[in-house]
Every structure is written in structure tokens, then in C-alpha cells.
Image (cartoon, rainbow, N blue to C red):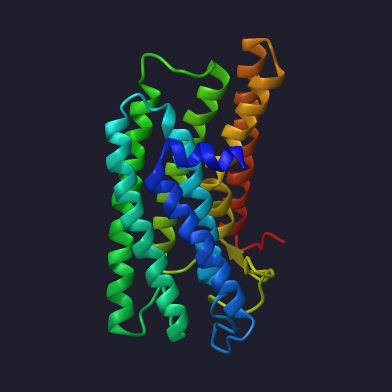
Amino acid sequence: MKLIEEIFSRNRPLAILGSFLLGLAICLGLYAMINTVEVLGINSMIKPIKFALSTWVYAWTMAYLLFYVNNQNRVKWYSILATIVMLYENGVITIQAFRGKFSHFNQTELLGGILYVLMGIMIVWLTTATLIISVRFILQKSYSINKAFALSIKIGLLFFVIFSFFGGYMSVINSHNIGGKIGEAGLPLLNWSTLFGDLRVAHFFGIHSLQIIPLLGYFTSKRITSEKKALSIVWIGSIVYLAFICFAIMQALKGIAFI
């Protein structure tokens, strides 16, 4: 596909990272059919599959979008850092899944606790680096793309950073559920709680602003010839989307299940 070729030509390290994680998700999906290990009552392979798929989308999205950052030397170092951190995170999640142990909120074993703390430190490091490179993009004096698309990338990056840090709140309270313990009934695959408030809902939609908002900007800029109108659509769409995420946060904090 032309899009995949474009991604590889723009940022090879992140393109390769994404491809590896997509392959990992497929392999784990096949293994899940015969896996008998469970964590909190569900197939232990579900979590590493979800994270591998999510990281694949992140890696390929960043490979595509960071091409528009004027300082590509900074992008190169960011890509190396992202590759190291994402391989570590997915590695821990996968290994712990095979062991039948928690990868997050692990307070039951020394090894799992250490791996989790290191994961948190590395994620904060990467998220801070993402904030820095996002600010650099926002403060650029010129862009190789139209204003509506550029605006959507700026907003998408900022939302991504904000709700990546929001994930740290779950670490602070040592849970993603509000009103009940982790586990029990949840949605298929996503496993979002159907009994209690679940902060993962807002975190999920928040970090995937990185794809949704730029897609809005891309297609708007392609179809709307008026620059002013295109910018307005991006702003309105972003505000509505942010309002939805805030609603999901308030719902979870009140202990109400998303569905």
C-alpha cells in the first residue's frame, strides 16, 4: 500500500517498531486460542494484544505526523527513545502475561513491582519528550501543510500528551476502577468495567486523539476550500471530542460504568 510505503520512507525506526508490534499482536492472537493462563478471569493474552495493537497505531501515526516537524534531527532522537520505551513496555506486559502475573498495579511480587515502576518512569520520560517535540512543532514559523491540517496535528499531539499523563493518575490511585475492585465483568476485549467507573475509557479516547483529530483535519482540508471554514470545523470537532472525553472522566469518577 502507498500509505505504508510513505510511513516507512518518513520514519523507518517507528515504521519498523509498528510492524514488529503488529506481528506480535497477530502471533499472540493465534496463541490466545490455545492459551489456558488467565489473569483476573480473562485470557492473559488479551492485554498484551491490546497494547501491541495500540502501540502499532501510535508508532505508525507518529512516523507519519512527525515528518512535518522542521527539525528532523530531534525527530530522529525521539524515535529512538520511543522505540526503546515501547519495546520495554510491551515486553514487560507480554512476559507477565505468559507468567500469569499483573503487569500494571502489581503489588503482589517484588519482580513485578520493580518492572512496573521502571515502566512508569520510562513512560513519563517518553511523554515528556513527546510534549517537548509537540511544543517545537507548535512554535514552528512555517509549515509544509495547510493551516487546518497543521492545527489538527497540534491539537492531536497536545490531547495525546495530556491524556498520556492522565494515565499517571491511575498509577497514583493504583487502580483504573472507581467504586469497585479491578476485575469482574467487563466489555469483550477492551475489558472496560460494566459495573464500576473505569478511567481507561477516557485514557483510551484521549490518547487516540493522536489519530482522530488529525484525520478530521486531513479530510476537512481536502474537502473544504475555505481556509476559515476548515479551521472552524477542526476547532469545533476538537472541542466536541474533548467534551466527550471529559464526560467519560466525570462518569468514571462518579463510579458509573461507561456502558
User: What x and y, as percent, mark residue 247?
Assistant: 63, 47
Is residue 226 in view from this perspective? yes
Q: Residue furthest bottom?
A: 36
Decide which of 165, 153 is in the foreground and name it.
153
Residue 222 position by quadrant: top right
Please state, as top left, top right, bottom left or bottom right, where the N terminus lies in the image: top right
Decide which of 109, 178 is in the foreground and name it.
109
Residue 92 is left or right of residue 208, and the answer is: left
User: What x and y, as percent, mark residue 253?
Assistant: 55, 58
Is residue 104 in view from this perspective? no
Decide which of 252, 85 is in the foreground and name it.
85
Residue 230 position by quadrant: top right
Q: Is residue 139 above or below residue 127?
A: above
User: What x and y, as percent, mark residue 79?
Assistant: 34, 45
Please state, as top left, top right, bottom left or bottom right, where the C terminus lies in the image: bottom right
Residue 146 is left or right of residue 67, and the answer is: right
Q: How many marks?
A: 0
Residue 149 is left or right of residue 220, and the answer is: left
Decide which of 229, 22 is in the foreground and name it.
22
Q: Residue at x 43, y 83 (%)?
A: 101
Q: Is residue 122 above or below residue 130?
A: below
Q: Residue at x 50, y 23 (%)?
A: 150
Q: Residue at x 67, y 14 (%)?
A: 229
Residue 135 is left or right of residue 60, and the answer is: left
User: What x and y, as percent, mark residue 52?
Assistant: 50, 62
